């Protein structure tokens, strides 16, 4: 599958439920089916759009979209490659960046170079995990074939443990992608240079599991977020490796957001997510304001959502967020280009909420 499958249904929920599940958006005994769509952007600039429609009769206002609205239907088109699309500026557009404080600079720089107004609103923060203190001892306790690192934050935390362990020699790292690898390489270029790391052909845990050189009996240390999926350890164990996972950190929603910034964010053109935790924090922290906004008048859209990769897009599906975009190959360049694609999405092809009969 190129895209996650969303759970889509018809809702007649109370206002309280609608606030909790943001897109259960209009309290009505005659709520019409709504449309949820996903866009995945391939490395060849092709666009695959997935549109899911709940059971029932489709309202006329939903038929304005340019893509066919049928269940599990995919339409693949070519993105524009004209000079105009390359040089287009977006001075009238606003994008919300939501990663931890200090980690939004690279994306913001690319967006600002094309005139986008960026609103930095960190939704999550890193906190120590229960296994953090044991990392140095565990690192020294075995001759590990690989240390697998699957996020920039995990790389940062690993470097701290590596230093506390006395910088042992012979540590080989496998990183999920270049962005994560650069954190290690920047800290210790002689030891963890990119060409000394194993980096899979696609920046996903699934691809890392398939391509990592290991065999029966290989020892793999996996320092990870407490909230990371079990994809990597289960996949490597199925290949015969012994995997020791340490939950060295976790990501938690920030405690407070400025209400004025939240009001500005829910009116933005695009909101970006770099992790599933950020998606859930958006719903929890901004859901009330978003609900008030999209139900304030006819024709009010909520932002499009652009994820760094498929895992975050799946979290959007679970939270029932519409107009979700993500690059087929995760990474900063693809993420930024996908934001521009989302900004180009015409309003006639946006999810417009539930219609009243």
Image (cartoon, rainbow, N blue to C red):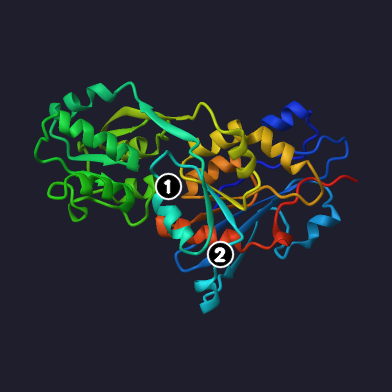
Q: Are marks 2 and 1 in contact (CB under 8 Å)?
A: no
Q: Residue at x 46, y 45 (%)?
A: 274
Q: Nearer the viewer, residue 70 or 173?
A: 173
Mark 1 is surrounded, within 10 Å at the Cα level, by few (under 14), some (14 to 19) or many (20 or more) other residues, namely: some
- Can residue 250 be seen here? The reply is yes
Q: Label for residue 47?
A: 2
Q: Residue at x 39, y 48 (%)?
A: 204
As measured in the structure, the alpha-carbon distance from the residue carrying label 2 to the one carrying label 1 is 25 Å
Q: Can you give x and y, in whole percent of width and height, for residue 255 in the image? A: 51, 26
- Can residue 22 be seen here? The reply is no
Q: Nearer the viewer, residue 102 or 193?
A: 102
**12 left or right of 291?**
right
Q: Quick one: which residue is furthest to the right in this view? A: 357
Q: Secondary structure at mark 1?
A: loop
**37 left or right of 249?**
right
Task: Please determine whether, in this image, residue 269 is positioned above or below residue 279.
Answer: below
Q: Nearer the viewer, residue 44 or 349?
A: 349
Nearer the camera: disc 2 or disc 1: 1
**47 left or right of 191?**
right
Q: Residue at x 50, y 73 (%)?
A: 87
Q: Secondary structure at mark 2?
A: strand
- Name the residue tied to disc 1: 104
**85 left or right of 172?**
right
């Amino acid at each position: 599958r190129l895209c996650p499958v969303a759970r889509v249904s018809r809702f007649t929920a109370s206002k309280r439920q609608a606030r909790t599940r943001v897109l259960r958006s209009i309290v009505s005994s005659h709520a019409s089916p709504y449309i949820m769509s996903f866009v995945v952007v391939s490395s060849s600039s092709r666009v695959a759009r997935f549109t899911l429609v709940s059971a029932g009769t489709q309202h006329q206002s939903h038929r304005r979209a340019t893509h066919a609205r049928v269940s599990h239907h995919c339409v693949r088109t070519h993105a524009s490659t004209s000079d105009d699309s390359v040089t287009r500026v977006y001075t009238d557009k606003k994008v919300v960046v939501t990663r931890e404080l200090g980690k939004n600079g690279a994306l913001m720089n690319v967006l600002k170079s094309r005139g986008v107004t960026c609103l930095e609103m960190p939704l999550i923060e890193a906190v120590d995990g229960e296994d953090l203190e044991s990392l140095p001892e565990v690192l020294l306790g075995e001759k590990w074939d690989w240390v697998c690192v699957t996020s920039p934050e995990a790389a940062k935390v690993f470097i701290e443990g590596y230093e506390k362990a006395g910088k042992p020699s012979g540590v080989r790292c496998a990183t999920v992608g270049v962005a994560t690898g650069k954190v290690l390489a920047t800290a210790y270029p002689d030891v963890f240079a990119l060409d000394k790391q194993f980096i899979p052909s696609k920046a996903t845990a699934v691809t890392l599991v398939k391509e990592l050189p290991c065999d029966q009996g290989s020892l793999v240390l996996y320092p990870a977020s407490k909230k990371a999926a079990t994809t990597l350890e289960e996949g490597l164990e199925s290949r015969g490796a012994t995997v020791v996972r340490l939950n060295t950190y976790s990501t938690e929603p920030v405690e407070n957001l400025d209400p004025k910034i939240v009001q500005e964010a829910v009116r933005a053109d695009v909101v970006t997510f770099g992790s599933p935790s950020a998606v859930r924090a958006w719903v929890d922290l901004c859901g009330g304001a978003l609900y008030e906004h999209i139900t304030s008048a006819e024709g009010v859209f909520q932002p499009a959502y652009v994820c760094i990769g498929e895992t975050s897009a799946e979290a959007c599906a679970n939270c029932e967020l519409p107009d979700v975009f993500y690059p087929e190959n995760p990474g900063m360049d693809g993420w930024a280009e996908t934001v521009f694609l989302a900004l180009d999405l015409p309003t006639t092809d946006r999810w417009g909420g539930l219609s009243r009969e």
